[in-house]
């Protein structure tokens, strides 16, 4: 099976936790897009009804509209029943690094507003220690790039400005991203997360600690459901 097949399998399995009448947080990325399509298909078949989606990015909003998922906002629905989203790393405790897709700020707002967050991924996303496979993305106000970069380096990270197609990557909220590399991974995610937050100009970081309740991880052999049962 290709990685895309594994992502699709995990995403479609997680959709079992979505029931008619729910407000659903719609994650961002190449795994989450399969979840959006699966929900669209179930709505089209009539197997799901009265779903309202809250997208975590402009890209996800476009895809949700394309497949016929009615959208709402956090202002209209401040509490989300379930959010399904991908991740760049999943720890044994279901702590996550997210944000390589650039949507970490809206993703964290949506995950935090959710009664339940389910993370989906292929087996390569599982890590023993956060920060060993992916850098930690930090979303920063452009004006503050210099001091924030210096501050992140003082915390032991190697921050690299994210560039896409030769130009500085700008998030949906108009900010830049500094991808923080940690040579030995992240020792104490809680501590580093708190320290990063203290610096003015930092908007959010990609550590999602204690937010995911369930992980659905697909490998060539099996689809593992980790943490709380899907339903
Ligand atoms: C976007 C994210 C994505 O969920 C994460 O990057 C995983 O992406 P993919 O499913 O494409 O591997 O955090 O901000």
Image (cartoon, rainbow, N blue to C red):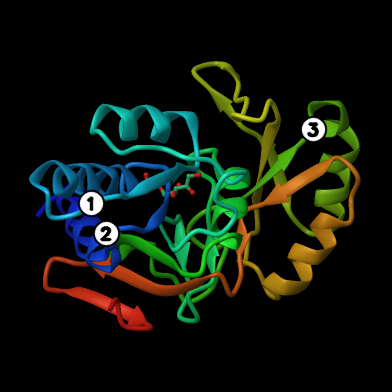
Rendering quarter of residue 149? top right
Residue shown at 54% from the left, 38% from the top: 102
Evaluate if marks 3 and 2 touch, with contact meaning CB atoms under 8 Å apart.
no
How packed is label 2: few (under 14 Cα within 10 Å), some, or many (20 or more)? few
**Under tag 1, what secondary structure?**
loop
Rendering quarter of residue 169? top right
Evaluate if marks 1 and 2 touch, with contact meaning CB atoms under 8 Å apart.
yes
Residue shown at 8% from the left, 46% from the top: 45
Q: For this rendering, which residue is in front, 202 or 77?
A: 77
Evaluate if marks 3 and 1 touch, with contact meaning CB atoms under 8 Å apart.
no
Residue indicated by mark 3: 141
Q: Is residue 184 above or below residue 7?
A: below
Residue shown at 41% from the left, 37% from the top: 71
**Under tag 2, what secondary structure?**
loop
Give the spatial CA distance, label 3 vs label 1: 40 Å
Give the spatial CA distance, label 3 vs label 2: 39 Å
Furthest residue in direction top, as rendered:
166
Q: Is residue 23 above or below residue 54?
A: below
Residue indicated by mark 1: 49
Q: Position of residue 43 (x, y in %)?
A: 18, 46
Q: Is residue 85 visible?
A: no
Looking at the image, residue 17 sits to the left or right of residue 212; the answer is left
**Quadrant the C terminus occupies:** bottom left
Mark 3 C-beta closer than 8 Å to ligand 1: no
Give the spatial CA distance, label 1 vs label 2: 5 Å
Looking at the image, residue 38 sits to the left or right of residue 153; the answer is left
Q: Is residue 3 above or below residue 66?
A: below
Residue indicated by mark 2: 20
How packed is label 3: few (under 14 Cα within 10 Å), some, or many (20 or more)? some
Q: Position of residue 87 (x, y in %)?
A: 44, 56
């Amino acid at each position: 099976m290709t990685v895309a097949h594994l992502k699709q399998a995990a995403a479609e399995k997680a959709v079992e936790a979505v029931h008619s009448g729910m407000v659903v947080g719609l994650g961002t990325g190449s795994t989450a897009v399969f979840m959006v399509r699966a929900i669209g298909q179930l709505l089209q078949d009539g197997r799901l009804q009265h779903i309202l989606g809250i997208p975590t990015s402009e890209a996800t909003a476009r895809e949700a509209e394309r497949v016929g998922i009615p959208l709402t906002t956090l202002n209209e629905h401040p509490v989300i029943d379930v959010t399904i989203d991908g991740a760049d790393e999943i720890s044994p405790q279901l702590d996550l690094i997210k944000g390589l897709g650039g949507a970490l700020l809206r993703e964290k707002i949506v995950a935090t507003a959710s009664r339940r967050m389910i993370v989906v991924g292929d087996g390569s996303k599982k890590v023993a220690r956060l920060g060993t496979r992916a850098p930690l993305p930090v979303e920063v106000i452009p004006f503050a790039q210099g001091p924030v970069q210096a501050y992140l380096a003082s915390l032991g990270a190697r921050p690299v400005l994210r560039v896409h197609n030769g130009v500085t990557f700008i998030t949906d909220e108009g900010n830049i991203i500094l991808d923080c590399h940690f040579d030995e991974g992240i020792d104490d995610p809680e501590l580093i997360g708190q320290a990063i937050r203290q610096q003015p100009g930092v908007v959010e970081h990609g550590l999602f600690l204690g937010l995911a309740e369930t992980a659905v991880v697909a490998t060539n052999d099996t689809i593992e459901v980790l943490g709380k049962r899907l339903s």
